[in-house]
Image (cartoon, grey):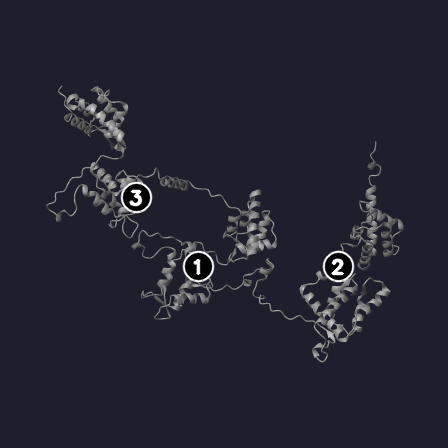
Amino acid sequence: MQLPCQENPNAENDRALLAWKLCNRIRSTLDRYHAQDLRNCLHRHDLCSSGTVQGYDFARVVSTALGGCLTENEICHLAEYFRSPDGGGVAYGQFLTVVAGEDEGLGKDLDGRRTLSASEHRRLSLVLMEIAQALRFREQVLRPYFEDYDLIAHNGGSVTLAYFKRVLYFLGITLRKAEFTLLAKRFNVGHYKIDYEAFVGEIDELLRYLDTRGPIERECDGEVPAKIIAVELPKVDRPEVGTVELARVLQKDTAYHPCLAPSRQERDFRTLMLRIQRYVWENRVRIREFFEQYDSFQCGLISRSQFVRAMDAVGLSGLHRLPLTDGEVRTICDRYGDSRDANRIRWTCFTDDVDEVFTVKNLDKGAFREVESPPEEVEALEREGRQDACSEGRDLAKELVDCIRTLVSARRVLIGPAFKDFDPHRNGHVSRSQVGEALSMAGVFITEEQRYALNERYCDDLGFNYVDFLKDVDPCPKIASAYEEMQDRLAKINADTGPEPHPHERDIVRVLAKVKGQVVRRRLRIVDYMRGFDPLNHHRITCDQFRRGLATASIDLTPTEVCTLARIFKTPLQETVDYKRFCDTVAEVDYQCNLEKAPRLVPLRHFPSEDGPHNHLNFEERTIVSKALQRLARQADVVSNLSAPLQDFDRNHLGVVNRNQLIRAMATRELHNAVSSREFEVLCKCFAVEIGHRREVDYRALLAALDYLYANRENHPF
């Protein structure tokens, strides 16, 4: 069984091939004038502007226009081929597009105004005004001369160019070739006809406007029309011509050469010094050595010519890497000129100001002053030649950079090697023309306007800075080194503040008492640990050195207590600590200063207190300790000889034992049953002392308390 389409599979192709042959025959017969007439005739039969006409209208118009070129069967075949899908008529628009091309007259620009530029439209308005003034002066009517021709030719409101020119000449209106060409361009219909209806309509509007201005003064020479109408537009001042770059107007690079770049404006003194400091810092130039050879007497003054010669040797001139104009060199010379001799320059002041990019002068008198090298404003200075783009250019460049960044991230494109291929010297710059080539090699295609916006944003005096461009487009993730990770961990450890500091840690009396107690028990000389940080014997060190000295001496203090000491013993005018005054204050535990002024004064020995937060008892705990001591006092040392086992545990005779040893000694004398576990814990806390980093029990104080309570006990004889 065969499908219907398989009976003649090439039937549709045969119909299209026959229609194509017929259209080629019509296309070779029609010229552009007859094609426009054919188009106008079909438009007139399309009363509803639906784009279709009836089949018999299509056949009659095509047969008349072609003059027997096609037979009736061939015209019927064309009408059947171009019939609309709904069957309502023939789609003559498709037929005209095939045989005559796109509609350039009626379809796109019916009135012709859009084909005129702004200057042509101004000249045309002046030409029409001159014609209207001439007709008004001679009191002539224009319309009847064209209606007589239209009654005979039946052109539908249009006349030929030759007849239009004859009518104007008959009326005494003579136009130059340029004005007549402009007039024909405006009112042209069908490439060789003039739409006199539109022309007469505009002339009538101008006549009505002239009538509103009053009657004509015929005695005035200014009202007499000229023999030949010639219009010249007044010359418009264009101050931007020669001053504005053509590339900025067109927003694309037309031609680039260094000689075409606009002249650079002279920089002020502040900008000049920043540029010179940046140049000296990048090239590590010892600028003083170039000026010293001209100052034989070391007076700090040289002549102006010698100063300019030294700057030229450094590279600060119009022929070197940092070009300076004569006016900029003159500005520097005037700034550092001697007040008593205008021909002398204070070169030492100039070199001191430039060398501030490395260090600060007289730094030995302020050893703790922070020096920033280079200064922030010098480091942030942009390279010479970077131009400020307009707001539209900045927005376009920003949008383009975001688009390229997204494209590179999505496609995983390595865009950097494409630029490095055009940069054999690895100076981080390529030429303006190589930007588009490098991007196209990476698969990124941009227009001329986009390339111009990128050049405006990233170009400087060396070319296109692709290093900055890659930082914005393809930012590399920062890989932290092991050293940086260690520094971050140390910073986090040092930044750990710990628990909330207690109020007693900010009390200088209690902090000094704590330090003196540790000095007396361990017999320390803190000044020996501080002198190593003061080689010049100024008796002042930094806060970090002060903290390090206390840590070397093994003084157990919290960070808050160390900050309290540094704040109290701070020097008046600097961020340092007067360690000599601190050491003299702590040394009062051993001696008293200025004792020679009071020979009868007997110095007192310092006995440190063992009380602290570790053995502080509240009211409930004091009650528990009191009851426990009352029970243990019945078996005091004179009764139970408790000191013997405790001294056996205290081999170094320090007077302290740990909790386990205390409970074992009490168990040997059967005193462990006299107190509960809670009472034993509070009892150890009451007589606790800190030895190193552990807590011990002062058994001597415990025995002394028991003996005191035993001696003062209540005696009940009965």
Indicate which disc, 3 or 2, sits on the residue closer to the N terminus: 2
- Residues packed near mark 1 inside 10 Å, few (<14), some (14 to 19) or many (20 plus): many
Work out how far the residue at label 3 is from the one at label 2, CA to CA, in angstroms.
90 Å
Three-letter residue code for mark 1: Arg
Q: Are marks 1 and 2 in contact (CB under 8 Å)?
A: no
- Location of the C terminus (image quadrant): top left
Secondary structure mostly seen in magenta is: helix
Q: Are marks 3 and 2 in contact (CB under 8 Å)?
A: no
Indicate which disc, 3 or 1, sits on the residue closer to the N terminus: 1
Point out which mark residue 525 bears.
Answer: none
Three-letter residue code for mark 2: Leu
- Which residue is tagged 3? 563
Residue 226, compared with residue 35, is above or below; it is: below
> Residue 419 location, x and y as percent?
54, 50
In the image, residue 525 lies in the stretch drawn in magenta: no
Residue 495, compared with residue 176, is above or below; it is: above
- Location of the N terminus (image quadrant): top right
Q: Tell me: 631 left or right of 186.
A: left
- Which residue is tagged 2? 110
> Residue 41 location, x and y as percent?
83, 56
Question: Residue 412 lies in what quarter of the image?
Answer: top right
Question: Residue 413 lies in what quarter of the image?
Answer: top right
> Residue 378 location, x and y as percent?
42, 56
Residue drawn at x 34%, y 38% as measured from the top left:
500
Region of the chain picked out in magenta, as a range = 272-277
- Which residue is tagged 1? 275
> Residue 391 location, x and y as percent?
55, 56
Three-letter residue code for mark 3: Cys
- Classify mark 3: helix, strand or loop: helix
